[in-house]
Image: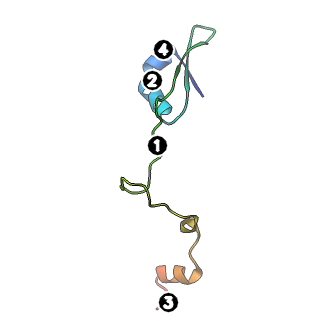
Amino acid sequence: MITASIFEAKTNLSNLVKHAQKGEVVTITSGRAKTPVARLEAIQPIAKKRLGVLETPGFVLSERFFEPLPEADLELWNGGGK
């Protein structure tokens, strides 16, 4: 959770809105006691970005994509083999 005074909120509003769009809650405080007076949160957080430009979901990378290549394949990529 992010906390900002009224002055800080006025000065950094666009940055605080970006945090709220990511799903964070921003509490705005007032006075020396920093009493919470308002809360800034997104109406609808921005969805996580997908790989590529496809509008329709359906392409999903499997966990196997991130596994290391076998030695034989690595040799071919590095110019070895036939």
Q: Secondary structure at mark 3?
A: loop
Query: What residue type is disc 3 on?
Result: Gly
Residue 3, horizontal then vertical, whole percent:
57, 22
Could you give the CA–CA distance between mark 2 and mark 4, rounded to whole angstroms? Answer: 9 Å
Give whichever of discs 1 and 4 has the lower sequence position. 4
Secondary structure found at label 2: loop
Q: Nearer the viewer, mark 1 or mark 2?
A: 1
Q: Secondary structure at mark 4?
A: helix
Give the residue number, with chain letter if any, for mark 1.
Answer: 47
User: Disc 4 residue type?
Assistant: Phe
Mark 4 and mark 3: span between their CA atoms?
Answer: 65 Å
In this picture, residue 14 sits left or right of residue 67: left
Distance from disc 1 to disc 2, alpha carbons, whole Å, reads: 23 Å
**Residue highlighted by disc 2:** 12
The one of 78 and 52 positioned closer to us in this rendering: 52
The residue carrying mark 4 is 7
Considering only vertical position in the picture, is 79 above or below 12?
below
Tag nearer the camera, 3 or 1 = 1
Residue located at (57% from left, 68% from top): 64
**Which residue is labeled 3 in the image?**
81
Local packing at callout 1 (Cα closer than 10 Å; few below 14, some 14-19, many 20+) is few
Q: Residue 14, how many percent across, how many down?
A: 41, 27
Circle 4 residues within 10 Å: few <14, some 14–19, many ≥20:
few
- x%, y% of residue 9? 48, 19
